[in-house]
Image (tube, rainbow, N blue to C red):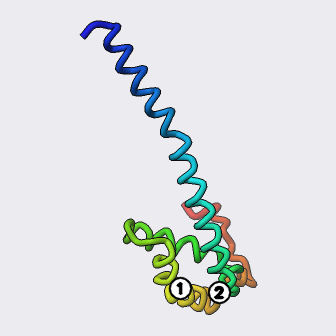
């Protein structure tokens, strides 16, 4: 294969990739819009989750990692009881700062 043939193959490959680019970007935008609508509906249905977005994201990421082929809508349905349980657990935790700060001065210990 000489340089001319090689360049011809490279140029044709680049042209095909560039021609498919609008389709790929269009699909990405469509998926993004759909996921935003699903998220909006999800938070409308479960308004208590709005104050615990960190828990929601954490649970969904974990479930998505365990079920990579699951549809996003189904993933959210599966996540609801886990999110509710984690929020309930968080509310039971004592997160108040200690009233007495321990002495961390270790001078003279050694």
Q: Between residue 93 and residue 76, name the one nearer to us.
A: 76
How far apart are labels 1 and 2 at the CA level?
Answer: 9 Å
Residue 4 versus residue 91 in the image, above or below: above
Q: Secondary structure at mark 1?
A: helix
Q: Which residue is mark 1?
A: 80
Residue at 70% over, 86% down: 47
Residue at 67% over, 75% down: 40
Residue 4 versus residue 11 in the image, above or below: above
- Give residue 46's position: percent from left, percent from top: 65, 86
- Give residue 106's position: percent from left, percent from top: 62, 64
Density class for disc 1 (Cα within 10 Å; few <14, some 14-19, many ≥20) is some
Q: Between residue 5 and residue 38, name the one nearer to us.
A: 5
Which of disc 2 and disc 1 is earlier in sequence? 2
Residue at 67% over, 83% down: 95
| Number of numbered discs visible in the structure rendering | 2
Q: Is residue 2 left or right of residue 81?
A: left
Quarter containing the C terminus: bottom right
The answer to whether the residues at label 1 and label 2 have Cβ atoms under 8 Å apart is: yes
Density class for disc 2 (Cα within 10 Å; few <14, some 14-19, many ≥20) is few
Q: Is residue 55 left or right of residue 14?
A: right
Q: Secondary structure at mark 2?
A: loop
Q: Which mark is residue 46?
A: 2
- Give residue 24's position: percent from left, percent from top: 51, 46
Q: Between residue 110 and residue 72, name the one nearer to us.
A: 72
Residue 96: quadrant of the picture:
bottom right
- Give residue 42's position: percent from left, percent from top: 62, 80
């Amino acid at each position: 294969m000489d340089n001319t043939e090689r360049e011809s193959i490279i140029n044709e490959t680049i042209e095909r990739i560039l021609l498919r680019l609008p389709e790929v970007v269009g699909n990405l935008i469509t998926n993004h819009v759909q996921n935003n609508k699903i998220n909006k509906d999800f938070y409308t249905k479960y308004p208590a989750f709005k104050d615990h977005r960190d828990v929601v994201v954490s649970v969904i990421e974990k479930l998505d990692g365990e079920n990579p082929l699951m549809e996003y809508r189904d993933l959210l349905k599966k996540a609801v009881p886990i999110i509710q349980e984690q929020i309930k657990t968080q509310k039971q935790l004592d997160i108040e700062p200690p009233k007495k700060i321990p002495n961390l001065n270790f001078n003279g210990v050694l």
